[in-house]
Amino acid sequence: MNSTTSLQHHGTEPQGRFAALLRNATVGEPHTNTAQTITFVYKQADEDVDVAVSADASTRQVSDVADALSFILKAAGMAENTHAGLLAAIGFAAGRTVWIKAPDKLVGRRLPNTGDDVSDENAARRWRYAWQKIEAEQERIGLCLVERQAGGRNREGQDESSRLRVPVVQFVADVVAAAKQQPSFRQKRGDCLENAAKQIVADIRGDYRRAPDKYRRPRTDDESRLTALTNRASTDISKALDILTANGGDIDEYFETLKRLAIRKHQEAAAPVTPNVSSLPIESIRESQAGGGAEEGTTFRHRCDDGKAMLQAFAAAGAYSFDVTLRDTKQKVEFMADVPFAWLSEQLPRMLEKADRLESSLIVRPRVGDGCALVQLDDLNAETVARLSDFAVCALETSPNNYQAFVAVSGVADEKERESVRARLIAAAAADKGATGAARLAGSFNAKEKYRQADNSFVCVRLVSVSPGRTVTVAELDAAFLLAAIPPQPTPSVSDSDEKRGVVARVPRREPSYEKAMASVRRKADGSVDRSAVDALFAVTCLNWNWTPAETVNILRRNSPKAAEKSRDNYAERTVAWAESQARKDSYASTH
């Protein structure tokens, strides 16, 4: 018998706003997960759980827990679009408040699925998306309700699941316990729970902002990491000393050996994994790092090095975060916005492996702050890349003989100047005007069918040169003839008739294409062009493009053979008048 049937059999449904959702959060798992959550809460409140209902909690207790959770989220100001994710985490935790293994796919199965895709990959993706919203909300309100540590490959090369901790279960228990201490709890359960929730949230929010150990997520600053590593090393050394002592070993010699080993490991790690050099060919960088040549550069480690070098170059030039996209040969597979450099650099091997597995490109878009422009120059040839080598942050070969370069320009005052510099750089380099600033990461594959090779793999994006932190000024680019001339501003013109009417001078505008109008109109039954319909469409288009009726008449006469032939019959004037009436009808219809 499931929990819903049991509750209905008991005679009353829980009245709490989250009661049904709390039960539904355990869809796909035994309903004992909900019972364990209720049991934990009431044990904390020193009360036995009512087991009269199918070894589950009573309807009153379910309602109390649901109300306590609802009032906590209300008092904290947690956005409603995070509730489903929170309930999934609570259901998975099953009353546990310690760190637990929580594979993304298992937590994701508890989330509502509006599509037909019931795969584990889709479930994991939905949970990670829900977690992003939860994490952002927790940062906003200054309160930690759920903690998550992403899984990945550990130092031994083994895959580890994500981990989860759900402090909000303890908060619910605290609210229920505090509410039960109030004399009017039996008569006004809801009011008592709400007041207790407000008080608990105020207390833990203050604690969280003062960063105690109990309610804050693990710190990642250098001091905390050093403390954690020291504690771990102390434990390992203590175990080693026990073994050494039991076998009559020399402790002093052991520590000397340990010291030499630590120094050697440090020196090996101190060798730059990502190049921090001026503009060198990447082959030279690889040789200096690993003593190998281009053949060794095809290994996965060097692909990771290329990607990290590119990210480091962007970060040193002013990029504070990245938008990351996985895109296969047809569509976007995954997207993450505003990813910090440190996290992306650390997780890069795992992300490259995932991109390889999904046959996807790993695309990054650096975000830079004010005062700097990071300009992407796409579709370059080898000669242009060589000319830019002393100015570019990095250069890539995205496909055979097809290159990209990024130039960081400092001292850019505003968005208008940034766009001007970008346009002038692109024009001077004869680059693609449609470049958006997003590029396939060096070391990843260019997952397009046209670049699929004989062995079914894709072309790898190659890092040609890199110069971390290199920025240039507009004056330096201008002196090197890398900026096109500023285009002259159009000269305002005023016709004689406009001047008499006192019309302000206006900049010449582009006229619509008569050929496009002709192609858009259906031909007659005999296959000939319906000239009248073409002229009518062309006149309407001119008016929609803010040409005046008089200007439209002149434009129509210049482009329409029929208007030129019937100039004496006022054909152009009649066509434009009809177009004006249609425009007025459309305007009236759109406002009524």
Image (tube, helix red, strand yellow):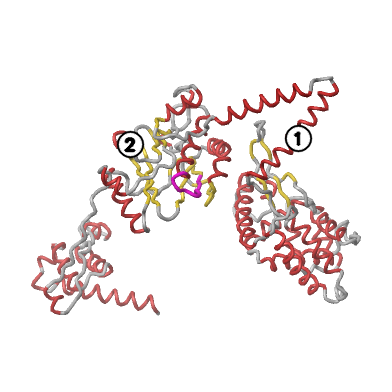
Q: Residues within 10 Å of mark 2 (few under 14, many from 20)?
A: many
- Extent of the magenta region: 316-325
Give the residue number, with chain letter if any, for mark 2: 385
Left or right of 517 on screen, residue 493:
left
Q: Secondary structure at mark 2?
A: helix
The quadrant of the image that shows the C terminus is: bottom left
**Residue at horizontal 80%, vertical 27%?**
241
Cα distance, mark 2 to mark 1?
A: 52 Å
Question: What amino acid is at disc 1?
Answer: Ser
Nearer-N-terminus badge (2/1): 1
Tell me the tag on residue 234. Answer: 1
User: Please, what secondary structure does the residue beneath circle 1 have?
Assistant: helix
Residue 439 vertical placement versus 196 (above, below): above
Q: Nearer the viewer, residue 355 or 490?
A: 490
Q: Is residue 52 visible?
A: no
Q: Residue at x 52, y 52 (%)?
A: 338
Question: Residue sitting at 16 percent across and 62 percent down?
Answer: 559
**Compared with residue 542, is residue 127 higher up or lower down, i.e. above or below?**
above
> Can you tell which quarter of the image residue 54 is in?
bottom right
Does the stretch in magenta take in 323? Answer: yes
Task: Specify the amino acid type for callout 2.
Answer: Val
x, y percent for residue 148: 68, 49
